[in-house]
Amino acid sequence: MASTAAPIRTILDPTGERSVAERQRLARPASLSGLTVGLLDISKPRGDVFLNRIEERLVAAGADVKRYRKPTFTKPAPVDLRHQISVECQVVIEALAD
Amino acid sequence: MADTLDRPELPDGIVVVVKEECATCHAVGSVLMQLDEAITLTVYTQDDPNFPSGIAAVHDADLAISWHYDIETVPTVIRVVDGVEIERTIGWRRDEWERVTGIAGLGPDLPAMRPGCGSMSVDPDLVDALNVRFGASILASRRIDVAAAEDEMEMMFARGWTDGLPVVPPTEERVMRMLTGTTRAPSDIVATVPPDLVDVTVEKVAIAAVMAGCKPEYLPWVLTAVEAACTNEFNMHGLLATTMPVGPVIICSGPGTRAIGMNSGGNALGQGNRANSTIGRALQLVVRNVGGGRPGEVDRATHGSPGKIGFCFAENDAESPYGTLAGEHGMEPGVDALTVFAGEGTRCVVDQLSRDPESLARSLAASLQALHHPKLILGFDAILVMGPEHARVFAEGGWDRERIVAGISAHLNRPGSELVRGADGMAEGLPAGFGDAPSLPKFRPGGLMLAYAGGGAGLFSEIIGGWANGEIGSAPVTRAVTY
């Protein structure tokens, strides 16, 4: 094999070349008692049925519950809504249902 | 061998670029002798270092001078003051040479003018390598060396850069050539691509266009498609994330579609035409490789559709009896434009017997009612692609675009009682509250759109069904092509 004779072919990276920022998850709370839990309804049909039941159980466990809703399930949550949840809650649950 | 790839400086005085393999350059040999005696003259020779005889020419062996100073014709005469080009003339024209050099009585034995020859720096066999050698530093993308024993096609599959079909390796030569298709700078930001929301440059779009198999003249269409697809109204993120089988359908119109050889006739929605096949694919490769939208990840389609590899066609606007889809969205006639539509695959409507508009409108309506589900209404748009034979029925009846849409829509109204959940023994349908509505339309206003494409024979139309429409999903986006 005359591999030394083969020219080096160079191609250009077709990707976005983003360096992936890894972020650590927060530690899971030992208890939900006294914490504010956000429930984000993504606006899929019957998501509210699921979240209503979750809310009942969380309140029974001593948590405060706040409810949020995305305008449409087809788009990411608006940045303002994400910020609001982040400052009002310690825990968030996002519901996907059909 | 040049020490640097930077732009070399031109010496002050008169600079003339010639090549031995050019009869006009030979013809002006005596003129160069005249100039050499009268003024400060520097002659660059592209091929033979000993040409022209009697002149101590500088050999532009690597064509650096010729490339950097955009020499397209030899001879070229340039007047340089303080290292800056003041003016130039090409070929042989006595009056021009005398004006640029300031010397009268040049070449008295020559005819008044004689055209020059092509510069070696624009020789099709050389230009790609020169563009890389002197110009590739404008490319910002990471260079990846392919090992000698590595198959670059397999390497690109292994890195996850393909849609399942082979891609053309995006070498510097090919990307530089692709970039000649636009006047935009490689570093220009075209759009922010979902789902990872990455800013994509003209260069990255050109790379995707190379990989998809595009020619440089398709690039403006690809750039415009990327811009249109990466808007909030179009909602490319949602198209990926949905479980429905939709992708961006690109419908092009305007004289530019013919200039780049797009197919709007027989099999326009099928295979076999390079522009149709690769423009849509290039957009999808941008979404995949730059935006990070890949099946099994953010792309959650239950079935997908063949169109998700790339779905692009041209309208036959030159012969359309009812204008173009872009025109329906406000674009002036004759403007190169495209519309991106969140669409599934095509569904054929067969009606070989209708010869009057009313009958054909009823046939088309019957098929359109079934779109996604006969009992689901208003939530989905559709594009009806008619070819010459169906469109002729309407044209001969005197129906224009608005009349066709209205005529079809007139047969797309059904009482709520037929559409509610449980009606006809089908659980799917509208909530019970709609049961009392006397008449409900299938499409929202503007939700039924027309396009014109297809071959001369066949009494068929094609339905391209849409996805969740409007604010909650995707709206069609029309853009003029930017060159």
Image (spheres, coloured by chain):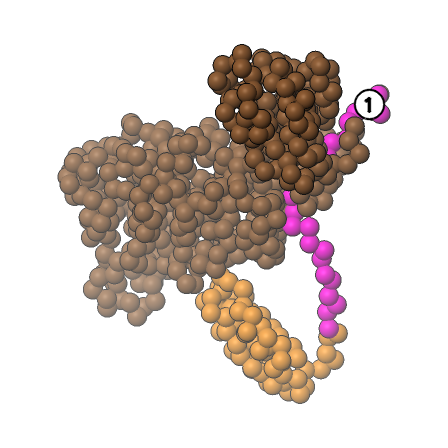
- Rendered view: A22 above or below B21: below
Q: Nearer the viewer, residue B189 or A97?
A: B189
Kindly identify which residue carries mark 1. Answer: A5
Main SS, magenta region, reads: loop
User: Who's the residue at 33% across and 29% down the image?
Assistant: B455
Q: Report the magenta residues as a range.
A: A2-26
Q: Position of residue B461 (x, y in %)?
A: 30, 38
Q: Is residue A27 left or right of residue B378?
A: right
Instruction: Indicate the secondary structure of the residue bearing disc 1.
Output: helix
Q: The chain shown in brown is which?
A: B
Three-letter residue code for mark 1: Ala
Q: Nearer the viewer, residue B475 or B102?
A: B102
Say whether residue B347 is visible. no
Q: Position of residue B216 (x, y in %)?
A: 53, 34
- Rendered view: B101 above or below B379: above
Q: Chain of mark 1?
A: A
User: Who's the residue at 47% across and 66% down the image?
Assistant: A72
Q: Position of residue B28 (x, y in %)?
A: 59, 16
